[in-house]
Amino acid sequence: MRVRLSTGLIGALAAAIVAMVLGEPLAQESQKSVWSGIYTPQQAERGAAGYAQNCQKCHGAQLQGLGEAKPLTGSEFLSNWNGLTVGDLFDRVRTTMPLDNPRALTREAYADILAYVLKFNGFPAGPAEMDHRTEVLAGIRFDAFRASAARGSLLAHAFAEPVPNSQPNPYVAQPGFLAFPAGRSAGSTSGVAVDSQGHIWVADRCAANSCDGSDLDPVLEFASNGAFIKSFGKGLMVFPHGLFVDGHDRIWVTCAQAKDGRGAQVFAFDSQGHRLMTLGKAGISREGPDTFSEPNAVIVARDGTILVADGHSPGKGPARIVRFDAKGKFLGQWGTRGPARGQMEVPHTLAMDSKGRLFVGDRWNNRIDIFTPEGKLLDVWTQFGRPSGIYIDKADRIYVADSESRARDGYGHNPGWKRGIRVGDARTGAVTAFIPDTETDPESQATSGPEGVWADSHGVIYGAQVLRKGVMRYLPPSKP
Ligand code: HEC
């Protein structure tokens, strides 16, 4: 067989020989990749707007792909482009997209949109904007899975691993740790928290998945060894949902449904169970300054400001964050319902980092929206999956419970993401551990594994479960 070598092939062979002579490591390190910080945050911000205008209708608000239009995130997308160059991706997009109007945008606009796509996939930003010349971008490798390719670059940080579900699980699960009182079984729960003494508090749906018509107490306290201490709150709630213990060990609970003159309220108790504050009107489910529709979650900032996430139903009702002063006076609210950046669809859970940034688990949109406590959007994260619960500890370690992600269409659709608890760094956004859900066929269940999540001062994780009821405990690797 006669082999005809093209000049391109000869060039490639020559380059390969040079690389062999120079040695593989040197050649690797001098190569720029998507890990080198090849776009700026401002550029990605512009790109987000460009994407919303030109790509979103086909590829989806979460880049998840719709119908024929493939996902622009997740393992399949990353595998498709792995090993090629940013120039290849740039030209593919520029010459064929938007599908109904290719080459419609300027090169600059395409580069901005690509910057946004890279950011969305967890590749770090850097000091300089992405170039819009194909030949320059052809020198940047799309090394989808290898952060190490950027070793030696000062900018290599952010995510050690952008591949969903791939982080290690060093935790050991301990089911049945909490000893419920005699005659009472654990119910569905989406709220668990630990106070300053290490006591574990649970918002339990009255041994069932609702307190409607029940005279059981929904709020239970357990000692750090799991022994039951006491309970309270009977007759106040229909669907206990969010639980938060503040810096003064006050126990805050939301009830997300209203029925027969009860519920759709937010309660604060002292640790003895005395009611200190009530927000909302009993049994009235309505959006207003002194009423809630479906209050999911409550959190208290260090200055005493109370923030409530309202709206549990996708497609109807509010999706808002309501602010009150420390005495419960209405201060204001923000949020409209929808998929766009800055909107929310189901603000299911709240957490705050040491800088006072508010993390909203925007469950229906499969993302975390990060706001100032006044409602200015700071960032949007997708690398923690579809959040039902978020907790951030004093050292800014973040714990996110995903109880709903599903590959198939319909409720929970979030292809590429598995359910479980993701642990990471609330400052950089890196995901460092993943505790997978143990349900055998999660696709057949709307919810499984923990919804609510908290960690104690030793890093022991508690997960509040709806489907399998009760609370799961996870021991960290260092715990003797
Ligand atoms: C009218 C619908 C539509 C619009 C608008 C659109 N796309 Fe696409 N896109 C598609 C379809 C359909 C495919 C799959 C068919 C194909 O590969 O050409 C696709 C494929 C892609 C791919 C290849 C995916 C892969 O896994 O290799 C990329 C990248 C892409 N689009 C980016 C974009 C960007 C960026 C925009 C906005 C500038 C955009 N698209 C706008 C419909 C659209």
Image (spheres, rainbow, N blue to C red):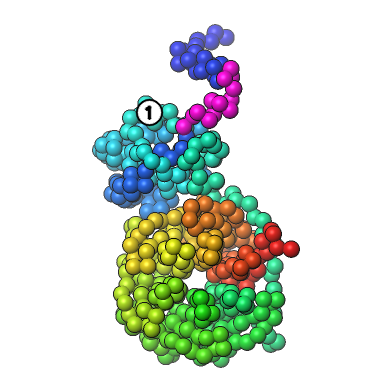
Q: Is residue 315 visible?
A: no
Q: Main secondary structure of the magenta part?
A: helix
Residue, disc 1: 136
Q: Name the outermost residue toward the top.
A: 2
Most foreground residue, 62 or 289: 289
Q: Is residue 286 left or right of residue 143?
A: left
Q: What residue sits 44% from the left and 82% below the top?
A: 266
Q: Kindly indicate the quadrant of the structure image that contains residue 345.
A: bottom left
Decide: is 410 above or below 20.
Answer: below
| Span colored in magenta | 20-32
> Which SS class for mark 1?
helix
Name the residue type under label 1. Val
Q: Is mark 1 within 8 Å of ligand 1?
A: no
Residue under the point 53% across and 30% down: 29
Q: Is residue 336 magenta?
A: no
Instruction: Farthest residue to the right: give it.
Output: 480
Q: Is residue 50 left or right of residue 37?
A: left
